[in-house]
Amino acid sequence: MQRETRIANFVLGALTALSLLLLSLPLSAPVRAFKAGTGYLLDPLAYHGEAGYRRIADSPMRIRKLLEADIENESLRVELRRSLWLATTVSALSLENERLRRALVLKAPAGRSPAWVHVMERDPIHWYRSLVVDAGYDRGVSLNDPVLGPRDGRLVAVGRVVDVRPNTSTVLLLTDELSAAAAYLSSGTYEGLVQGQDGPRLRMNYLNAEVRLSTGDSVYTSPTSATFPPDVLVGRVAKVNPRDPFLTFQSVEILPAADASSLQELMILRARPPVGEAKPPAYVPVFAPIEPPAEGPAAPAQAEDAGPKQPSVARPSRKRATVEASTGAVLKSMEALAVPNPEAIQ
Amino acid sequence: MIGFLRAVALFIGAMFVQWWWNTHFAYWGAAPQFLLVLTIIIAARRGPILGMLAGFGWGLYLDVARAELFGARALTLTLTAYIVGVARRQIDLRAAGPLAVTTFLATWAAFVAYGLLGLVFTRSFEWSGWIPVIMNPVLNAVVVTIAAVVWDVRGGRGS
């Protein structure tokens, strides 16, 4: 203990003397140098301490910014999803707008009130039978209204309405085996009955057994059709079936003009528009009448792309008049019988 | 070796904490004097020699920042360590209460000593201000109590 006391006293004396020496010395160059040296040694403490403090002090702000960035990131993700959805919607609407623009220039057969509708649904199992559109009683659609579709800048036959609900309707496609429509060939005005086969092609029966048929002929709806207006393109002859010696008529395979897999907008020719909608204009032939074909053997198709080269109903050719006289009434009744009347079924 | 490194770390760490607190958390000069508190607690637990050496070093550190009275803090802390080292023979400074009271009084004594040194060497009493003189002894007493508890918990009791 005594030794420790002595050492303590000695240390106290030494340190006190040193302190008093420092205190008594004026701030001369050696003292300032000593202070500067000590300050130099201790300066990193303050410098790095300040930097560390700033880092720690800024942590709440950084965390806040991180949280704000996370929130902003989330909102931007939502906005990006919305933008993508909008872009998709705009793209779809643009395509639809383009289709509708093309459809707008199409002239509907006069005497009926056209209504553009969208295809809502189709039966994947019976692809060639029917589809559902988004118009019903609310838009004046009624049973047996003909349905046309746009194809290459013109309206082509698609089918007819067989079921009408308040907001939707069912369209029976021409390709359904229960469908039938009276039609004629563009090359010789020969009439027949176009019938569906539940497949991609149609079959045209009851063609005159004596005439020579060729592929590529256009097929148009006949004025004798109970459903369709006259001169609406149905399709083209894809194949002439071999003659059957036991039958009194010929038949051909027809490639429909309306592709069942690409139907999106359709035109329903309503018999009467709904209340409040403009009445249909008076009947005016929309498909320009052309020169009647020369008599004799059936001429090959001439400029079929320009439209049907058929006389209008008001001015039929002699041959066509003959055909109508012999088969028109029969075909009309057969067409009407081909599909059971939905109302009768109900 | 480890003990030496721990002592150096404590020496530098204490200076850092003192600077850090005084820079960012001192209000009107009221702040705990960690270096004084550590000088007292080292003198009370480890003897006056170690306390004086540490106090002198920390005092020089405190004096570096001042334009005048270079050595006053070193002398003040050295004397404080010596007095505490002597007092521990009469008082049980291992208990928190006596240690807090000793710190409280030593803080006031340090203020007075510093002022008197100023009076002697610069012919003006170095008055630290009312708020530090009133608040710092209280803060130092609180800090020394906490430090003593921490010291004991870490195994310093009886050493």
Image (tube, coloured by chain):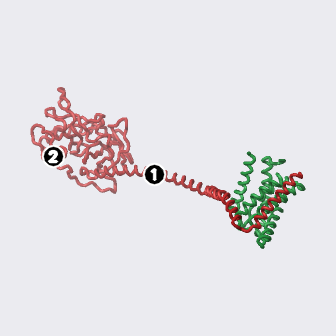
Chain colours: A red, B green
Q: Nearer the viewer, residue A253 or B156?
A: B156
Q: Check if mark 1's residue and mark 2's residue have beta carbons within 8 Å.
A: no
Q: Nearer the viewer, residue A44 or A223?
A: A44
Q: Secondary structure at mark 2?
A: loop
Which of the numbered marks, if any, corresponds to residue A82?
1
Determine the secondary structure under disc 1. Answer: helix
Q: Residues within 10 Å of mark 1 (few under 14, many from 20)?
A: few
Q: Is residue B114 left or right of residue A174?
A: right
Q: Residues within 10 Å of mark 2 (few under 14, many from 20)?
A: some
Q: Is residue A309 visible?
A: yes
Could you tell me which quadrant the N terminus of chain B lies in?
A: top right
Q: What residue sits right under mark 2 in the picture? A: A311
Please give the chain letter of the residue carrying mark 2: A
Mark drawn on residue A135: none
Measured along the vertical axis of the image, is residue B113 above or below residue A142? below
Disc 2 marks a residue whose amino acid type is Pro
Q: Amino acid at mark 1?
A: Arg
Q: Chain of mark 1?
A: A
Outermost residue toward the top in this view: A246
**A45 and A120: which one is in front?**
A45
Name the residue located 39 percent from the left edge and 48 percent from the top edge.
A167
Residue A35 versus residue A1 in the image, above or below: below
